[in-house]
């Protein structure tokens, strides 16, 4: 650990997972395993995964409100889509487009019949309608961001 190109500056080199997120031994996932077992669901983790908190520990959490120009493509056929980035009150049951930021420069876009990467593939006649709409929105947003950048660059005098 601690040797890759993108190692965060806030963590010392050669740190271990335990150094950063603490020792997970014996810690139960808060109710997850018990609740799942009670409902007859098998396979839920019985102990906390030390890697499940690494991004929060390294980068300071999910406070992304100050970021701009991000599209979070959520493929609802992905088993992990429930853990995606959604606004408060949004999620997999919400509309196709969900604003993450107040200014709308960050959005979650839901692809109901595809994976999170389907919007990056070439068009195909069999594409579900949601991915066609997601691609249209993405193209519109990127064009808007480019226009904003050009307008800002024109204002800067060197």
Image (spheres, rainbow, N blue to C red):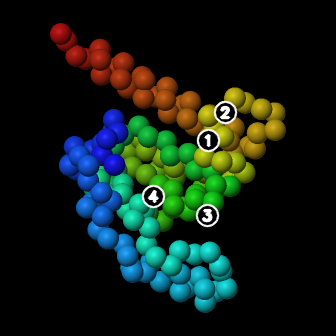
What is the distance, in whole Å, between disc 4 and disc 1 at their CAs? 20 Å
Residue 137: x and y in percent read 57, 37
* Residue at position x 29%, y 51% in the image: 59
The image quadrant of residue 5 is top left
Decide: marks 2, 1 in contact (CB < 8 A)? yes
Q: 10 Å neighbourhood of mark 1: few (<14), some, or many (≥20)? A: few
Residue in the foreground of this view, choosing between 92 and 2: 2
Residue 40: x and y in percent read 67, 85
Residue 34: x and y in percent read 53, 86
What is the distance, in whole Å, between disc 3 and disc 4 at their CAs? 12 Å
| Numbered tag placed on residue 134 in the rendering | none
Decide: marks 3, 1 in contact (CB < 8 A)? no
Q: 10 Å neighbourhood of mark 4: few (<14), some, or many (≥20)? A: some
Q: Going by the image, does 25 lie left or right of 120?
A: left
- Label 3 or label 1, whichever lies nearer to me, is 1
Say which residue label 4 marks. Answer: 87
* Residue at position x 36%, y 72% in the image: 24
What is the distance, in whole Å, between disc 2 and disc 4 at their CAs? 26 Å
Of labels 2 and 3, earlier in sequence is: 3
| Numbered tag placed on residue 93 in the rendering | 3
Say which residue label 1 marks. Answer: 117
| Numbered tag placed on residue 121 in the rendering | 2
| Residue 133 seen in the figure | no
- Label 2 or label 3, whichever lies nearer to me, is 2
- SS of the residue at dot 2? loop
Residue in the foreground of this view, choosing between 4 and 79: 4
Residue in the foreground of this view, choosing between 62 and 89: 62
Q: Residue furthest top?
A: 158
What is the distance, in whole Å, between disc 2 and disc 3 at their CAs? 24 Å
Of labels 2 and 4, earlier in sequence is: 4
* Residue at position x 65%, y 48% in the image: 115
What is the distance, in whole Å, between disc 3 and disc 1 at their CAs? 19 Å
């Amino acid at each position: 650990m601690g040797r890759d190109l993108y190692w965060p500056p806030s963590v010392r080199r050669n740190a271990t997972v335990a150094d950063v997120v603490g020792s997970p031994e014996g810690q139960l996932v808060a109710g997850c395993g018990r609740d799942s077992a009670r409902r007859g669901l098998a396979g839920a983790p019985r102990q906390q995964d030390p890697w499940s908190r690494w991004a929060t520990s390294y980068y300071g959490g999910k406070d992304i409100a100050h970021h701009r120009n991000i599209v979070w493509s959520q493929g609802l056929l992905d088993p992990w889509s429930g853990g995606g980035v959604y606004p408060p009150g949004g999620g997999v049951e919400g509309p196709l487009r969900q604003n993450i930021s107040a200014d709308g420069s960050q959005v979650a876009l839901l692809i109901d019949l595809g994976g999170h990467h389907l919007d990056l593939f070439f068009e195909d006649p069999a594409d579900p309608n949601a991915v066609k709409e997601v691609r249209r929105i993405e193209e519109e947003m990127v064009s808007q961001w480019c226009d904003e950048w050009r307008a800002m660059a024109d204002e800067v005098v060197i």
